[in-house]
Amino acid sequence: MAAEAEEYESVLCVKPAVLVYRLPPRASNRGYRAAEWQLDQPAWSGRLRITAKGSTAFIKLEDKTSGELFAQAPVEQFPGIAVEGVTDSSRYFVIRIEDGNGRRAFIGVGFVDRGDAFDFNVALQDHFKWVRQQSELARQAQDLEQGPKLDLGFKEGQTIKLSIANVKKKEGGTGGTRPRSAGPGGLSLLPPPPGGKSGTGERPAPLSTPAQLPGTPITDSLLSWPQPTAAPAADVWGDFAKASGSASSQAQGNTGWVQF
């Protein structure tokens, strides 16, 4: 997989117009100056492409029409000796080209637009920033593989103890009242109201009723029923005597006989 990734070539930047200059011999090590290149007489003009294969970037100078390669400069480090800026301008650079046979030469390249020069510089910076990140990640992965591995498994006979806090229920509520007993299903049962039915559906016996033995009938003498006031006995014979007396007197007055 790593070999296949290195064979893949990606395009980092394309600029349609670039100028190439021949460099005069350097008089000192103070750096290159674009003013010494005869900027009005470029040696070649064409298209510039920056590609990347693996960790190496390639600056390619190509013909605008046919795309034929004029020269290329492999860049393995930036900034470095393969690409160097001039001291008197931001639009010109010195690159080291190679022909594949070990021959190398330094040429000057310049951009008409300052923005193209900025993009050229940023494309190289971003690529080698990515290379450094990949190298750091690979180093960290290698350190983890070579370092001691943690054995988190249980040894034979090794146990683990868990401590769970016990939650105690407080007996009694506010004011020291005892909790009511729970009925079926954990529901608290309330006492039946006076005169109501109990939980079994039977009506409770009156408090004034004395306890009876099983099988003893309940009579009216055992119940505290209110006794009605007895009406005075009518003097039937008296009324009859009065009636009869009046009748007899009337009869005696008429006939002298008493009729019953």
Image (cartoon, grey):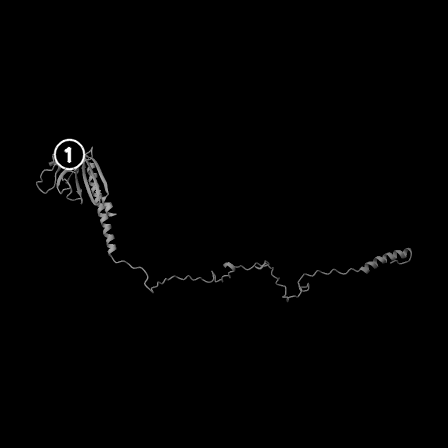
- Of 175 and 98, which appears nearest the observer? 98
**Coordinates of residue 164 in the picture (x, y in percent):** 38, 61
Q: Residue at 86%, 56% (x, y): give it.
A: 247
160 with respect to 13 (left or right): right
The vertical placement of 132 against 61, above or below, is: below
Judge whether residue 3 can be spotted in this image: yes
Residue 64, picture quadrant? top left
As drawn, the residue found furthest toward the bottom would be 213
- Of 93 and 82, which appears nearest the observer? 82
**Residue annotated with mark 1:** 44
Circle 1 sits in a helix, a strand or a loop, which is it? strand
The vertical placement of 63 against 137, above or below, is: above
**Coordinates of residue 76 in the picture (x, y in percent):** 18, 45
79 with respect to 200 (left or right): left
The vertical placement of 233 against 50, above or below, is: below
The vertical placement of 121 against 205, above or below, is: above
